[in-house]
Image (tube, helix red, strand yellow):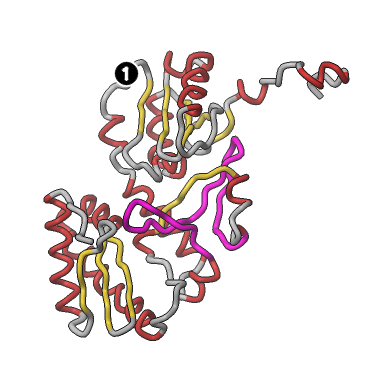
Amino acid sequence: MAAPRLDPTRQEFLDRLLVQMRSRYPSWSFTASEEGFALVGRKDRARLTLSLTGLHSAALAAGPRVPEEITKFVAAAGPRLSAAEGSPDSDDETPDPSALVWCVRTSRMIDRYPRAKELLTRPLPAGLVAFVAEALPGEIMRGVSRIAAGGGGISDIELQNSADQNTALRLASWRRKTSVAPRAGRWLFTDDALFSSSLLLVPEFLSEVAKLGGGTASLVVPDRGVLVAAIGEGAAPAQLGHLARRLYGRSTSPLSPQLLVTDGVSVTLHPGEREARRPWTGWRQVLGLGGR
C-alpha cells in the first residue's frame, strides 16, 4: 500500500526528517509510513514507528528554533532504535514521548479496558476520566501502560509532563479561534477527531475562555472530538443544555451531555446539573421512592 498523500507542508517536513534519520542512523532503513504522518525504521527483524505529529506541532510553535527541535527528536530516537534492535520480536513497544497526549473517555469505558489499572489517569467531572495515550499513525491511539513505559525508562512524571506539553501543542489552534468573537456566544472546537475534548486538560485554554467570559465559561464535551465553550448569553443553561443533548445524540464517540463550567483553573459540573433531579416516573413512582 502506498504512503498516504500529505499536504505539501507536512510532506516537506517528513522528507526533511527522512534525510536527518538516514544520515544519523545509516544502518537502519527509513521510509514514510503507509498509515499516516510517521516514519518507519527497519533493521533486520527490528521495526520501529516514529510519529511526526507531536514534533510537527512543536516545530510550528518553535519558530526559529525548529532545527533545535528536530535535532532533539533525532537524537532521542537513538535509544528507541537500540531497544527495538535488542528485542526485534517484541510486540509491546516503549511509548514514544513525542506522541503522548491526554485522552478523555467515560470512566465506564476505561473500567472495561483489560489494563485499566496500568493507565496514568486524571479524574474529570460528569463521569469522565483523562488518561495518557499514544497517538499512532492513521488517526488511532492506544492507552499507555505505566509498566511498559517504566520498562522503557519513562517515569510517571515524564509521562504526565509529555502528555501536558503535547496536548497543548496538538490543540493549539484554539488560540486562533478565541481571538475572534464567538458566534452566538459559543466556540466550537472540532479540529482533532480524537482529542478535541482534551482541551479540558489545557490550562492556558481554560484560563483564556474564563477570562473572556468575565470569570467563568461553560463547556460541553459530547464527543471525544468535540468541545463547545460558551460565554455570556451563549452559556444560558437551557439553550446550551439543549445543544449538548443534540450533539451527544449524534455523537460517534460519546462522552457526556452534561454541562461543565470552568473558573480558568479547574473544571467542575455546572451548578444546574448538580441541582437537576430525575423525573418521578416509572417504577419509582409505583414504589413511592421519589427522588431518593
Quadrant of res 44: bottom left
- Residue that appears at 57% across and 41% down: 128
Q: Counting other residues with Cα less than 10 Å from the Cα at mark 1, is it few (<14), some (14-19), or many (20 or more)? A: few
Magenta residues? 117-145
Q: Nearer the viewer, residue 163 or 119?
A: 119
- Residue at the right extreme of this rendering: 287
- Mark 1 residue type: Arg
In the displayed structure image, the side of residue 82 where residue 109 appears, left or right: right
**Is residue 198 on the magenta stretch?**
no
**Is residue 141 on the magenta stretch?**
yes
In the displayed structure image, the side of residue 11 where residue 254 appears, left or right: right
- Residue at the front extreme of this rendering: 1
Tell me the quarter of the image containing the C terminus.
Answer: top right
Instruction: In the rendered view, tell whether residue 30 sits above or below residue 242.
Output: below
Tell me the quarter of the image containing the N terminus.
Answer: bottom left
- Residue that appears at 45% across and 75% down: 152
| Number of marks drawn | 1
- Name the residue tied to disc 1: 183
Work out whether residue 238 can be spotted: yes
Q: Position of residue 244 (x, y in %)?
A: 49, 24
